[in-house]
Amino acid sequence: MYRVAALLTAGAVILGGCELPIGARGLGNAAPEPTVAPSTSTSQTRPEATVRRGTVQDSIKVIGRVISSQEAELYFRTTNRLRGIFIETGQEVKAGQVLAEQETGDLVTRIGKARATLDNAQIAHDKARSKGVLDETADEVSSFDVAQINLSQAALQLEKLGGGPQDADIKGAEAGVAQAIAGLEKSRLDLATKEAQLAAKQVDLGYKFTGPSPDAIAVAQAELETRRISVQRSMQGPRIEDVQQSEIKLEQARTKLAQVRDAPPVKAEDVANAEIAVRAAEIKLEQSRSVATGTQAQREADIRTAELNVEIARNKQASIQNQQVNAWDVRLAEQAVLAAENDIARLRAPNPFDAQTARVAYDLAITKLEALQRPPSEQDLAQINNEINSLQLAVESARLAIPSSEAAVSAAQVKLEGVLRGTNEFDIREQQSKVEKAQLDVEKARAQLDIERQKLTATRAGTTFDLQSLQKDVEKAKLDLDQLEGNYSDARIVAPFDGKVTKVNGKSGDNVQAFNPVISLSSPANLLINAQIAESDMPKLAVGQRALISLDAFPGQTINGTVQTLPSSVVTQQGVVADKNTKITVEWTRPGAQLGMNARVQIVVQKKDDVLLIPTQAIRTVGKRRFVEYMDGTVKRSRNVEIGISTDVETEVVSGLDEGMPILAGS
């Protein structure tokens, strides 16, 4: 009875702390009133916690293992006795390295013989092909082409002879005469030129002996005085009147530029009307000239009037065209302004180089006057005499060229006379003989070419058969070698990539079955983390989820990773097998990870920011009801809550609590 009474009391307490369902609270949206627990206690010993905002994430924590992204089970392709395994577990190997080998007997020797047989067959084939039949009919083909060309030319020449002199031949002969005459005239002109140059040099020599004339001395003195005045002006600076004159020129240039820029544009219709007026006046003039009625005086008066009208229309057209302002006129006016501005700037700020230039010109004038007044030196006389001798030889050479030019003119005239006279019967018969001979040459060349081509065809047929036979020998030898090398390759295990041996099965002398794994190889180049996920957590997984990884090789460091593949089902000979492995790519920060190392993996499956959080231990569950407890003064009350993400430490509160509210936590 005491036990029953105690149970009834406990049930009353629990039911008294239950909150009515939302539908039973009555009308309106009033806040739910907490249920007062029928407790008479005025104290509590459970710690308190405050509802706060923060970030919560749901994670899957597992232990993983470092594996390779590239693994291979290596085996032999033939059943035979194992000759030896050349590596050990844990050993690092290189791609192409021989790891194990079966007994092969004399296979290596047979491969060497097969390779030698292939080489010999290939050499014989290449030798026969290098002796391939060369097309040696090039000379015959060339001879045949030349014979055809000669026949065409001979026939064409015969046709020309039969048709009399051609206009082109006559014009060519006349051009030859004109060219020869021009050459003769050039020879005569060269002779006259050389004689004039010789006479000038002889006069120059006489001038050297007689000295300069008073006029030449006067000219040199006048030039010297002009240069002296220029030097004085450059030293004294610009004169006021020069500056004023330059300013006037600048103002005139600016005025012209403004006029050009401000000139009103000529209308297109005015230009067109002026052209039409000119054309109408010209037509009127043509009509006046064609009129045959009236007196002569009237016709002349009408023509003169029409000519005056044409002149007036043309003058008006020219006036309109001259009024047009183009870019070039503006450019010229701008250049004139710029030149005037430069002249003023040069006068106001003279360049020291101008004074130096004037001084140099003055010195040159002095030197020139002194040279005129100084008698000629022996070197000057010798130079003039050498030039006179050279000109005398040139005159003699030009005189001798005239007879050759005259002979060329005579020959050209004779050729022209022959062309105009035409051909005779003897020339035609001679050309016919040349045509017949050219035809015989063509037939002879064609026959010789046909003979050589028949020989070439027969030789090629025999050579082609020999090459085909030798090619078959090469192919057979290559097949034999490929088969032996394939057998040798099947009896060896070669590392397909750089890696580390993780497992070795068998020893020397064992009889190894084909395709049974003998060596397991993993590449350390790209390491992954393999983790087995509990079946209850598999629905939470997704490719691309972030993973936080910790290894003993990286103390105090968390490495980022990403879920690459998910668990799946594998079909084997035994049936469908569940694969619980999850592969995670790792952002390795430095080397140090080794195959087989254990790793602590935390896969973040869900994360929320700025949510209400309470300690997970603060949540109470009775049936389907979840609630938390808090103290209202000295009275313990409860409130229903709806939760979201829940971890071992914190739980997200979706509804039922407010931020900052104190609740009871712990037990």
Image: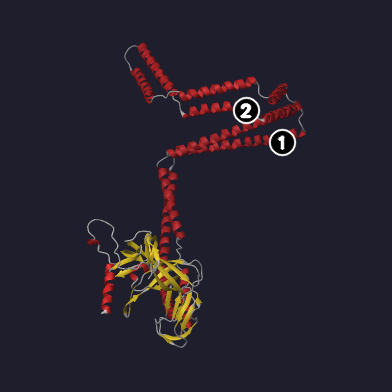
Label 2 belongs to which residue?
346
- The front one of 336 and 664 is 664
- The front one of 342 and 654 is 654
The relative height of residue 665 versus residue 108 in the rendered view (above or below) is above
Query: Element type at marker 1?
Result: helix
Q: How crowded is mark 1: few (under 14 residues within 10 Å), some or many (20 or more)?
A: few
Amino acid carrying label 2: it is: Arg
Q: Where is residue 17 in the image (x, y as percent from the top left)?
A: 29, 67
Front disc: 2 or 1: 2
Which of the colour schemes (rainbow, by chain, secondary structure, one colour) is used?
secondary structure
Label 1 belongs to which residue?
386
- On the picture, is 316 further left or further right than 87? left
User: Residue at image x 66%, y 21%?
Assistant: 239
Q: Where is residue 380 in the image (x, y as percent from the top left)?
A: 74, 33
The relative height of residue 486 versus residue 353 in the rendered view (above or below) is below
The relative height of residue 190 versus residue 222 in the rendered view (above or below) is below
- On the picture, is 398 further left or further right than 421? right
* Residue 69, visible in the rendered structure: no
Q: Identify the image quadrant of residue 544.
A: bottom left
Query: Element type at marker 2?
Result: helix
Amino acid carrying label 1: it is: Asn
- Count of numbered circles in the view: 2
Q: Position of residue 625 (x, y in %)?
A: 28, 67
- The front one of 603 and 222 is 603
For residue 629, the mark is none
- The front one of 57 and 130 is 57
Q: How crowded is mark 2: few (under 14 residues within 10 Å), some or many (20 or more)?
A: some
Q: Identify the image quadrant of residue 226.
A: top right
Whether residues under marks 2 and 1 lie with C-beta atoms below 8 angstroms apart, the answer is: no
* Residue 642, visible in the rendered structure: yes
Q: Position of residue 138 (x, y in %)?
A: 46, 60
Tell me the CA gap for discs 2 and 1. Answer: 49 Å
